[in-house]
Amino acid sequence: MNKRLALAIIPTLLAWTAAPAVAANLKEIFRAARLHDMRFRQSGASYREARTISPEARSAFLPHVSAQADTSYNDLTSKILGGSAGFVFPSGHFTFNANGYDVSVTETLLDIQALYAWRAAGDTVRAARQRYRLAKSDLVLAVCAKYFGFLLARDDLRLRHAEERALRAEYASAMRSFRLGRAPITNANEAQAGYEAVHAATLAAKNAVRLARARIERMIGGPAHHLWPLNMHRPLPRPHAGALVVDEARALRHNLVLQAARAQARAAGASAHALAAARYPTITAQAAYSYSRAGNGEFGFGTILRDKTIGLDLTLPIYQGGELSAKSARASAAAYHARVTALRIQRRVQFDVRQAFLNVRNGYHEIHALKAAEKAARVALASERLGMRVGVRNNVDVLRAEQAYYRSRRDLARATYDYLLGRLELKAAVSRLTAGDIERLNALLHPPTAPVPGNGGGPRRTPRP
């Protein structure tokens, strides 16, 4: 085998064996992203950590039972100096065992601070749950955005290649016309300028495809080959018939960002009430039983003791140097800040829903307009080429018609992907975006049938850009 050929093949083989290729459709990309995306996994870990807060706060109202046991070996030497005339304490060396145990039960009867702390913990857990659901929705949106971003870059590269070939042919035709004396040199210069500009745009489009693929591979943690293209001939889903007012009302009830902010505001309010309630009394009930036995002692005799107690404990803080008031004031300020934040998010959600709704409606009509414009540009290009053959048009006219035609095609592709992403953004604003939308979008794709320059969708022998 040729040494140079072997050196060129070895890096490719190493890249294939290092990580398995991921299946190309949107569904498989999303499945891989769920396993690899660290932001999504971090949100899941945060939610699991937050779920432990509520049982910890609830434990303040449940009985606390504790038991203790002890045993010891004692080696005692006692020497009594003096003593009473009526009773003489023995002196000497004693060895004996001592053991005992005790069991106590404590039950909280009144603790207003713990009650508010429990409520704050519940709202904190609800806020964490909403943020975890939001992370799922954001992952769906991010996967679709990166996938459609790659498809748009690949379509742009394919159109740039086609435009480059057409302008190269127009430049050659203009040069032939100039050599034959049928056209001025300015036509050839303009055709060359257009070709060079498109050639530079093609190089930039190749780099854009590489970057778009790298973003997907970073998200899924492996190579992403054979990505399925969008079937442009299938009808796009129409905008939903719901009114804007209905979407705004639904967003105000179900938007995950707003729900998390409201839960956090409630948690901050409950925490403020808990610190304010620290000055209230707490009442606990206690019951205990203890047993101890000593075989001997320093007075020369052993003991057996049994103790049973039951009672109530009242604790009332009177003055702690202003600490309780300072903490309560700080918690109240934090609760007010959380309420203002929730109000700001509510207004932003209303604007986002309105903007997404109008973008979706405008995008759907824009696609139909661009389809008509693309068809008109195609007819105009055919007319200009026919006019050049009969002598009523020149190369410059055809050049401009070709540029307008390919520009209309690029605009149509960009509007199509923007429309699909706009629908997802509207669903995300209303918090209706789920993994089921991946299935519906995946149905709009189709397997690649032929390799496209830079698409990564053909056979493996097709070079990547």
Image (cartoon, grey):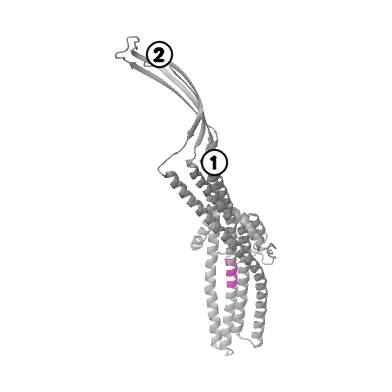
Q: Residue at x 62, y 74 (%)?
A: 408
Mark toward the viewer: 2 or 1: 1
- Of the numbered discs in the image, which one, if any, rests on residue 188? none
Q: How many marks?
A: 2
Q: Eyeballing the image, is 160 above or below 174?
A: above
Q: Amino acid at mark 2?
A: Phe
Outermost residue toward the top? 86
- For label 1, count other residues whose C-alpha is less than 10 Å away and answer few (under 14), some (14-19) or many (20+): some
Q: Which residue is mark 1?
A: 115
On screen, residue 137 versus residue 311, left or right, reads: right
Residue that protrudes farthest toward the left in the picture: 81
Name the residue carrying label 2. Answer: 301
Q: Is residue 297 left or right of residue 370?
A: left
- Residue 176 percent coordinates (x, y): 58, 85
Query: Label 2, label 1: how many angstroms apart (C-alpha)?
Result: 51 Å
Q: Residue 109 in the image: state x and y as whole percent.
A: 54, 34
Say what amino acid the circle numbered 1 marks.
Leu
**Residue 329 visible somewhere in the drawing:** yes
Inspect the magenta stretch and tell me whether residue 292 lies in it: no
Region of the chain picked out in magenta, as a range: 153-161
Question: Where does the C terminus fall, quadrant-wise?
Answer: bottom right
